Image (spheres, rainbow, N blue to C red):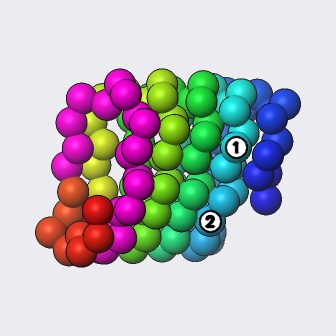
Amino acid sequence: MFEYCDNATMSTIKMSNSIQNLRYTFANCRNITAQPVCGPNVTDMEWTYSNCLKMTGSPVCGTKVVSLWNTYFNCRNLTGTAACGNNVTYMHGTYRNCYNLTKSICGPNVTDM
């Protein structure tokens, strides 16, 4: 939806409870400073926040998310603990180049990291 919106400078992201697929929604929006969010019914977050270089806060993942493929790739300013729910199975490249994360907690069903 907003992929490659380099000039977007959102400091807050709000999400409808009915959204299920966030694939590529904010990918390459390099100037977003908001903390990442995930609605309660989201199942797919592939590439959602990748290359959001100025995004801050801790990565979030709803309880229904299954795929986090490259979701936070290159989000260099994320901090704190990265946690994902019990339904996540696919995490290839999820936190790659997230230099400031202090810890990662993954659910028991992850089959691909």
Q: Nearer the viewer, residue 51 or 11?
A: 51
Dividing the picture into quarters, in which one does residue 92 lie?
A: bottom left
Residue under pointer 1:
28
Q: Residue at x 62, y 37 (%)?
A: 52
Q: Which quadrant of the figure contains the N terminus?
A: bottom right
- Residue 88 is a magenta residue: yes
Residue 99's spot in the image, x, y percent? Answer: 37, 28
Image point (21%, 57%), residue name: 106
Residue 17: give x, y in percent of width and height: 58, 64
Mark 2, Cα crowd under 10 Å, few <14 / some 14-19 / many 20+, is many
Q: What kind of element bears circle 2?
A: loop
Give the residue displayed 70% in from the left and 43% down from the top.
28
> Which badge, 2 or 1, is on the more N-terminal residue?
2
Q: In the rendered view, does 103 fall on the left or right side of 31?
A: left
Residue drawn at (69%, 57%), measured in percent from left and top?
Answer: 25
Q: Which residue is disc 2 drawn over?
A: 23
Residue 67 vertical position relative to residue 16 in the rendered view, above or below: below
| Highlighted magenta segment, given as a residue range | 85-105
Drawn side of residue 93 relative to residue 38, left or right:
left
